[in-house]
Image (cartoon, helix red, strand yellow):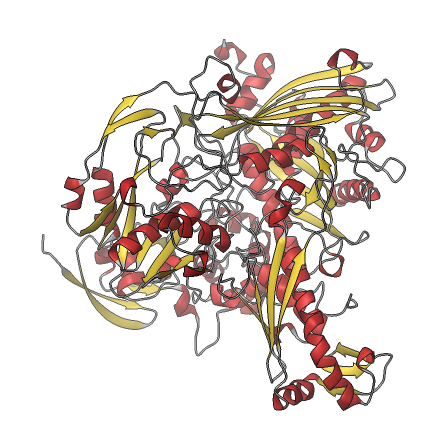
Amino acid sequence: MPETIIIHLTINGTGRSFRTPPGRRLLDLIRDDAGQTGTKEGCGAGECGACTVLLDGLPIPSCLVLAASCEGHEITTVEGLVHDGSPHAVQEAMVETGGVQCGFCTPGVIMTSVALLENSIDDREEQGRRLAGNLCRCTGYEKIFHALEVAGTTDD
Amino acid sequence: MTKIQPPLGGSHRRPDAMAKATGQTRYVGDLALPGMLHAAIAVSDRASARVLNFDVASARRMPGVEAVVTADEIPGDNQVGVIFPDQPLLVTDRVRMVGDRLALVAARTPEEAWDAARAISPAYEDQPGVFDPEKALDETSPTLHGTDNLLHTFQVLRGQTDPDHLDADVIVEAHYEIGGQDHAYLEPQACLAVPEGDRITISASCQCPFYIQQAVARVLAIPLASVRVEQAPTGGAFGGKEDYPSEPAACAAMLAWRTRRPVRLLYSREFDLQVTTKRHAMVVQHRWGADKNGRLVFAEVEAVLDCGAYAGLSTVVAERANVSAIGPYAVPNIMVRTRIAYTNNLFGGAYRGFGAPQVSFAAEATMDTLAHRLGMDPLEFRRINLVTPSDPLTCTDQPLAAPQMAQACLDRAVKDSEEHQIAPRAPDSWRRGRGISLALYGINLHRGGQFLDRSSAVVILQPDASVIVRVGLTEMGQGNLAAVQTVTAAALGIQPDKVQVWQPDTTTVADSGPTVASRGSHSSGRAVLDAIERLRRRLDPIAAELLGCRPEDVELADSCARVSGGGPSVPLIDVTREMAARRIETISTGWYRSKPRVFDEATGMGEPYASYAMACHVVDVAVDPDLGLVRVEHVAAAHDVGRVLHRTAAEGQVEGGVVQAMGWALTEELKLDQGRLLNPSFTDYLIPTSDDAPPVTVALLEDAPGRGPFGSKGLGEPAFIPTAAAIRNAVCAALDVEINRLPLTPPVIVRALAGNHRFKHLME
């Protein structure tokens, strides 16, 4: 196996290349190589969801994905949801409703929420099931559900 | 006191929220400096052993390793105990728990550091350990420190306390086994130490920068003034970042001091779960009696806290447990004894509720059992025995300022529960039950910790009428920044977005103690009001000149200074510009300390707390009678909050507290085997998900003002305390069983069903 490989992928709309060891986790590539530290590590085992990013629009735990497997793909992180200085509707709604407390789970929760809304999942039961991979210890989830409701209305 | 005005009670955006939602907030793990090294800790994997020898030479030769530090290299005291000097930073000859530290490693990458730390493996000689707190108190048990394992005993003795004379028409005896809990903050422990000549800066995820300052100064043998601790944005804490962060901070500081380079220490989730403090497991024995009319006659409580291997904060946790053991009920004769036992289990520390949730669980379970034995409705039985304006004394003989709030919270929670239309989520075949529980919460620190109950603030008024605020108490997600911002804006009559509250730093504010005991907004808010009062001694005369009135007639509202009673006004910015032009001092300090109180530790009589808050939770559950699964369908939570400072932050405290307590009640089992945690992962240690969380109807009652800013009361812990007992009572009502342990995992519930279980023949 080579010492390092070159990986090409798109992060938050910009095509980039990284020379990294072949075993590098996508999470480390995003945080340490691309300097996008908004994505958090809460467990390193795919249990907590704090490291959730969108891979071609699909929410995935970036701590369990090899960076090399993302060759040619598109990654969106919480930083990439801000366009021309304007936060995404989900970010606005999380702030507006009080869905943000300690903030450590927030980036992951927001990435999963964006995917939920883009797939028009607006039933609370279904939202609860699909957000269950994003642990939050502060809010009891009530205001996160409220944020989803508010953001869902904004999108329409 | 300034009158109530906007934005009090509003739901304006929390000042820290957008940076967190867009990924801009820099937690410790997001900070890196050139030349920074990564720390790791070599720890014991056994709970009780003599350390015969250990070799660190080979670890020193491993790739990337820059330093390995052992106990003999500590320049100051090898001691990190918060209250008792019973805990070394690094052990030398004996380990008392899994996770005891042997050596510290600094290396160029985290992987290299942890590889080297894991390679350090001493020769041990195992010693007998003790893992059961009640057995630990037997004379024959192996001891951890000194001649026995009893760390301390607290008591409450009121009225007739001779057990032989405590008799009643109906007596309930119950034995409660209550499990511990991990804080499971989403951000594991983290700190960064940066040396600079004869001083050092620590950035830490923490609840008390001052504790860290003291620990680092002690370990490095340098003056307190040489240690700067800034609180980094903190990704959840819940008590787990009160006492504990001094330990990793002292480790990182030692390595930074030794290598003269920045050193960052980040715990992995597994390591964090395995070695950090936990909510105390507790065993509580009850003997409570009532007369045939349903009046409580006596309450006898014997509680034993599992301290674990080191004292930590166990004495102060037990102190709160001791006086919280009866709840908001008027009982003439009381005998409470609370003992703390050293064991070789993981050590207990601060955790939201601080001993009160365990004893409240027992009290509220016994209340239900007594009601059933009396043939009374548990709701009615509680109504008969609640403290009232005519019977307003707590178990320590302290008169409550607003005893009527117990009844008010009960009525409101019951009403909200009945009016809420539950859309059942569980199948029809599951059994349904409703449970009630109350809490009487002593706000702020117990009288025993009163020496810590002071708080510092700095307010700097800017020429453009915006304001910089520094307080000594921390934001960890609970909303202290929002609360302080709100209090400042309301007191100065300005918009909240003109107020910037910055995180605590030991070089900008004086020691304000820990952000615990639901004292954050109370103590920092009161200090800010004091600073503003002092600032106005300089501001009001200038405003009076501009307005042509007397300084005492100046009031601040709507971003203006105006003559009180509806006279002329000038924009506040005109006043601040004038102050700047005249070079008037616009920085002001503020201070808050609670008033001295009287409390007799021998009898437990007196004023353990300055004031109290009430809460009541009513819970609806559905239980699968085959598998023992529980779904919480709805929670109605009514809280006596005095005054809402920030509405969504207050609601968030209640909603989050309820769900965290639900985890403790149902799924969060610390599986310990010989002191080692068998389930140190979120796959095996289950905290509630969005799929588990019930809808919570929150009622914030503002009828009885408290002593916090604008009449507010602490809320963070009362939000947690009643839930678990309400869930237990609901589960027992649903199944018609009595279960006296936590957590209520499926095996516990199935075992309780015993002869009534569908597959009882398989359980023989």
Q: Nearer the viewer, residue B634 or B212?
A: B212
Q: Quadrant of residue B33?
A: bottom left
- From this view, report whether residue B571 is shown above or below residue B33: below
Quadrant of the snapshot with the N terminus of chain B: bottom right
- From this view, report whether residue B663 is shown above or below residue B291: below
- From this view, report whether residue B635 is shown above or below residue B525: above
Residue B188 visible = no
- From this view, report whether residue B672 is shown above or below residue B683: above
Q: Quadrant of residue B296?
A: top right
Q: Quadrant of residue A97?
A: bottom right
Q: Is residue A26 left or right of residue B448?
A: left
Q: Is residue B284 left or right of residue B5?
A: left
Going by the picture, which residue comes out furthest to the left? A2
Residue B467 visible = yes
Q: Residue at x 24, y 48 (%)?
A: B113
Q: Is residue B610 left or right of residue B426?
A: right
* Residue B163 percent coordinates (x, y): 74, 14
Tally of marks? 0
Q: Residue at x 56, y 16 (%)?
A: B758
* Residue B35 percent coordinates (x, y): 24, 63
* Residue B546 percent coordinates (x, y): 76, 90
Q: Residue at x 59, y 81 (%)?
A: B462
* Residue B672 percent coordinates (x, y): 42, 27
Q: Residue at x 14, y 40 (%)?
A: B58
